[in-house]
Image: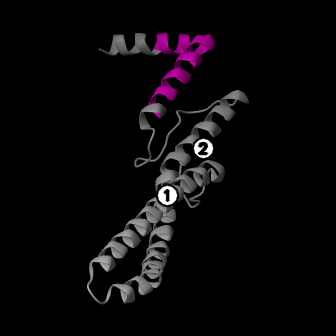
Amino acid sequence: MMQNKRRKKLIQPRLQMRLILTFLGVALIGLMLQFLLFAATMSALADELPQDGPILIERIPSFTLAVLGITVCVLLPLTITVGILTTFRIAGPLYRFEQHLKAIARGERVDDCRIRKGDELQEFCRTLNAAVNKLKSRSDPAADAESVLESRVLDRAA
């Protein structure tokens, strides 16, 4: 019986960390672009000021670094958290499929593979079950005979 809630958020750490690091890389590129645009805009504004331009140009580096620091301190932990929460809805089902297929490869009798309701890859789960059930029925003559008997019983009952 499957539990409804996963305790581990990093189910496949290697896959999840690669995805999260990709998210972080994109976020850092966006932050650097923001930093450069902010600094360029402030410099252009300082050039247009009649008297206080040199004072503003002198203070731009400290202001822009403070804005960048605050943004990094807020955005990076948020990106990591969202990355973990998003990737475990994909990594969990992949892990479950892997375990299900390993059990089949070991020759164990398995029920249908099930994943949690909110997880991604629901259609893949249904396709996997259909394929496994088709292979089971081809390789198990007893299952074929059983399904024929069941259909005859159902026909007689109807």
Is residue 23 placed above or below 117 in the rendered structure? below
- Which secondary structure, mark 1? helix
Residue 158 appears in the picture as rendered: yes
Is residue 1 in view from this perspective? no
10 Å crowding of disc 1: few (<14), some (14-19), many (20+): some
Position in image of residue 154 (x %, y %): 37, 15
Q: Which residues are magenta?
A: 125-149
Q: How busy is the neighbourhood of tag 2: few (under 14 within 10 Å), some, or many (20 plus)? A: some
Q: Position of residue 73 (x, y in %)?
A: 49, 76
Marks 1 and 2 sit apart, C-alpha to C-alpha, by: 17 Å
In-front residue for pair 95/117: 95
Residue at mark 1: 83
Amino acid carrying mark 2 in the image:
Tyr
Q: Residue at x 45, y 30 (%)?
A: 126
Which residue is denoted by mark 2 in the rendering?
A: 95
Label 1 vs label 2, nearer the camera? 1
- The local secondary structure at tag 2 comes to helix
